[in-house]
Amino acid sequence: MKYRKLGKTGLDVSVLSFGASSLGSLFRETNEEESIRTVHTAVDLGINLIDVSPYYGLTKAETVLGKAIAQLDRDRFILTTKAGRYGDAEFDFSKERIIRSVDESLKRLHTDYIDILYLHDIEFAAFDEVVEGAFPALDALKQSGKIRYFGVSGLPLSVFEKSLAVKELDSVLSYCHYALNDTSLLDIVPLLEQHEVGLVNASPLSMGLLSTRPAASWHPAPADIQRVCKEAAEYCASQGADIAKLAVQYATANERIPTTLVSTASPENIRKNIAWTDEPMDAGLLQEVLDILKPIHNKSWISGRPEYNEKTCV
């Protein structure tokens, strides 16, 4: 496993990180014992950053993860969770709720501190609410020692630009913007580097689009994006290759992207993902897949309020 610096935090993070959303049965009904074994396998094989949220499985993911990490030495992993989103349409970025959310997460996770706290999907809130309520909460939580570092997460890249214009952040978590079909995250990397902000990239499979299986019914991507991504996945399969392997290798190869999150509740799957990062990428297949995906390159979908989506291409 390779490791890279996460901005000014100074933390050395594994190029592949563990996203615990699957432990909340988001993609399939999961077995708790298997989920715990998956977390232990990830850490034993070198992954040292674990990300979760109270939103995933409506606290189930945090609860199961808490049982898993209670059996591990705390200094073996970097723990990140989120606050502000608690349901499909339940958001609260007030100072009081953010602080209370962290206290609740600490209990579920059986720990007394969070390494990095992210405000979860802030594009669903008025930016003034985030600035006036959530940002001061982050400062208070950091001062209290309940969190070591903080940042924001969201889909529109403007989330990070707007936030950094008014608040120094330690890290940001972006998803679906550095994958085979969308590399628009690179547009804001210079800004993040200028501020020495750590960067966590999530969803190298575009939340399941880069797969021969049908996308989840809740997936917000327009039909053309879903169709072309499936075409690319099926082409890989016809060549005897797995597009998931190519996607993970592609995401983790870029040294300007410190770490990429993958989520699974299967020990076998996490072993495969970790092994892929050490194997050479098939450059010929990569170019063929990128050519297939070219018609939808950097196309995304609207998330949250209009004020955050001015640059979104759909």
Image: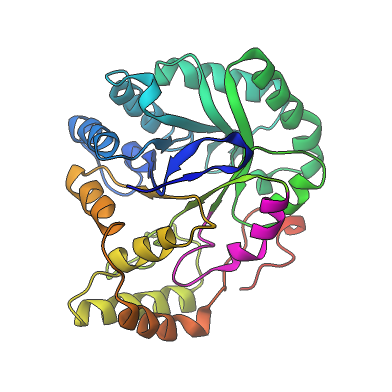
Q: Is residue 212 above or below residue 52?
A: below
Considering only vertical position in the picture, is 51 above or below 74?
A: below
Residue 158 percent across, percent down from the top left: 71, 56
Q: Quadrant of residue 58?
A: top left
In the picture, measured across the screen, residue 121 lies left or right of residue 131, that is left
Indicate the position of residue 56 as horizontal and vertical percent values.
43, 38
Residue 233: x and y in percent read 31, 75
**Vertically, is 312 above or below 207?**
below
| Residue drawn where x is 45% and y is 30% of the image | 79
Residue placed at 59% from the left, 35% from the top? 9
Residue 168 seen by the camera:
yes
In the rendered image, the quadrant that contains the C terminus is bottom right
- What range of the chain is rendered magenta? 175-194
Q: Residue drawn at (75%, 45%), measured in percent from left and top?
A: 163
Pick whichever, 10 or 313, lies toward us: 10
Compared to residue 290, the image places residue 272 above or below, namely above
Residue at image location 60% in from the left, 15% down from the top = 145
Q: Is residue 182 left or right of residue 47?
A: right
Q: Is residue 251 magenta?
A: no
In the rendered image, residue 192, in percent from the top left (x then y), is placed at 67, 51
The colour scheme used here is rainbow
| Residue 305 is at least partly visible in this image | no
